[in-house]
Image (cartoon, rainbow, N blue to C red):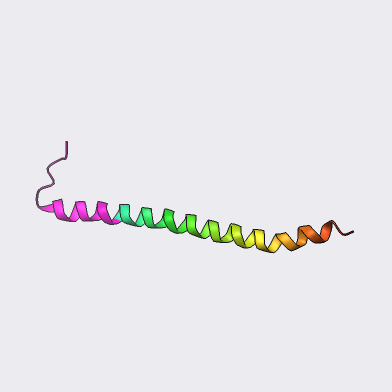
Amino acid sequence: MMPDLGKYAVSVLSAYGASICLLVAIVVLSLLRGRRVRAEMERVERPAAGERGNG
């Protein structure tokens, strides 16, 4: 299943591993930042929604 990488096996597999780790980290950090931004937007917009009804 896995091709014979010869003397480059360690380099190639570590590059794959590092790439996968970085991709996972980017996805996780993006999701966490999205949650923070969404919560901040809700916090900022909540008082404004109450003010509209008073007019």
**Residue at far top of view:** 1
Splitting the image into 4 quarters, where does residue 45 fall?
A: bottom right
Number of numbered discs present?
Answer: 0
**Residue toward you, 26 or 40:** 40
Residue 46 picture location, percent across and down: 72, 60
Splitting the image into 4 quarters, where does residue 41 fall?
A: bottom right
Q: What stretch is highlighted in magenta?
A: 1-18
The majority secondary structure of the magenta stretch comes to helix
**Residue at far left of view:** 7
Residue at image location 15% in from the left, 55% down from the top: 10
Residue at image location 9% in from the left, 52% down from the top: 7
Residue 47 against residue 13 in the figure, above or below: below
Residue 52 picture location, percent across and down: 83, 58
16 in magenta:
yes
Splitting the image into 4 quarters, where does residue 11 fall?
A: bottom left
Residue at image location 14% in from the left, 52% down from the top: 8
**Residue toward you, 20 or 53:** 53
**In the figure, is residue 14 to the left or right of 55?**
left
Quadrant the C terminus occupies = bottom right
14 in magenta:
yes
Quadrant the N terminus occupies = top left
**In the figure, is residue 40 to the left or right of 9?**
right
